[in-house]
Image: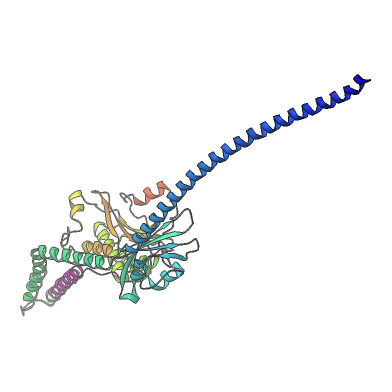
Amino acid sequence: MDKATDNPQQIEAGRLAEAFRLFSQASEDLAGAYTSLQEQVAGLTAELALANGRLKREIAEKTALTERLALLLDALPAGVAVLDAFGRVEQANPAAAGILGADIEGRNWEEFAASCLAATATPGEWEMPRLRNRRVAVAETRLAASGGRLVLIHDVTEAHRMKAQAARNERLAAMGEMAAGLAHQLRTPLAAALLYAGALENPRLPEAERARCGSRVVERLQHLERLIRDMLTFARGEASGGESIPVSALLAEAAQVFEPLARRREVAFVVADESAGAVVTGNRKTLSGALVNLMENALDACAAGGRVELSAALAEATVCIRVQDNGRGMDATTRERLFEPFFTTRAEGTGLGLAIARGVARAHGGGIEVDSAPGAGALFRLTLPVCAAGIPLSPGPSPARGRGEEERSLAPLAGRGPGRGELCDRVAIL
């Protein structure tokens, strides 16, 4: 009886003991986990404190850098404007407002530039008529991260004035060196005119001879007048104007003047315009005169039956106008002296035409180059900066041209004479 009674009690006691043991073990496990968690929290807290410290230092450094950059931006003598992706000015330093004469923050840059900046012959430089023709240089850089742009503005008014003064001083120095040559150039036609005029005083001079002498006097005086006019043009250094001139119109004007001269000399004349509607800024009269000077030089190098080509092609931000002939060409010595004032290989030449042409090209921000060899003709390349509509701060790419096509277009015209019926053949300007 007792054993049967004690057995359930023992069983229950065993169960309680086992439960207590399990509880104790779970408590120990929980205490260990809690301790481990405390250690992890302590480690994470320490790491977070270190990270917070580094972050605070980085923020402090960036704040100091931002302040230094802001001070530097405010102290810069050049204007700086930050544009957003839509062309609106997000930020501009005080120099930008001072140079442009207006606060441009919050304004659309393209609209402001179109209303206040006038294009000049020098790429990247603009005049401000409202501020007594102040001249500024404008350049921009795209910001890849934001899609905006960074515009840099420099006041180059004084630099431009000094450059113009230096160019004038250079011309005056050249004039001093040319004084002896000028005296000789003036003396020769004047002496010839006096000689023919003296012959006219002879009362027994036949009428035919009198007419011939009178014609010679007029020719010599006209040559003298042309020499003086060219000398004055060279001495003044034709300043470029602000007129927008389509290259096609420039070619047409020069061709209209030159075509009768080519016809009279029985020289073929061809015009090819690939300027793609390009527009240049400058003085229409002087640019057309420079082109005519180049073509007259080519004409003088050609015999009857020769050929002169006038062409133009767009190349990135410039237009290249070519004058090419298949005449006698020139040697290296002649090429080196070709643009010297009063240098000429012709008895009737003044030696100023090419010097004036180069001066006009430089005044318009361009230049002239020549390729030639004896018997291989000559190629003159007049390059000018183009001016698109609006404010072309970043000129777009030009249409691609084949390499072979470019090489063919630049090759001298050696051995290419006009065929039957080709005299004065002029291709219509597109």
Q: Assess whether residue 369 is covered by the magenta stretch.
A: no
Q: Quadrant of residue 219?
A: bottom left
The number of callouts visible is 0
Residue at position x 24%, y 52% in the image: 329
Quarter in which the C terminus is drawn: bottom left
Q: Quadrant of residue 65?
A: bottom left
Which residues lie in the magenta part?
A: 211-240
In this view of the protein, can residue 348 be seen by the observer? Answer: no
- Foreground: 32 or 157? 32
Please give the name of the residue rendered at 23% of the width and 61% of the height, measured from the top-left corner: 354
Q: Position of residue 257 (x, y in %)?
A: 31, 69
Question: Hey, which residue is sitting farthest bottom in the picture?
Answer: 203
Compared to residue 14, the image places residue 79 above or below, namely below
The x, y position of residue 368, in whole percent, is 27, 58
Q: Measured from the top left, where is residue 239 in percent x and y?
A: 26, 70
Q: Is residue 129 above or below residue 273?
A: below
Residue drawn at point x = 14 percent, y = 63 percent:
174
Q: Nearer the viewer, residue 229 or 44?
A: 44
Viewer-closest of 318 and 422: 318
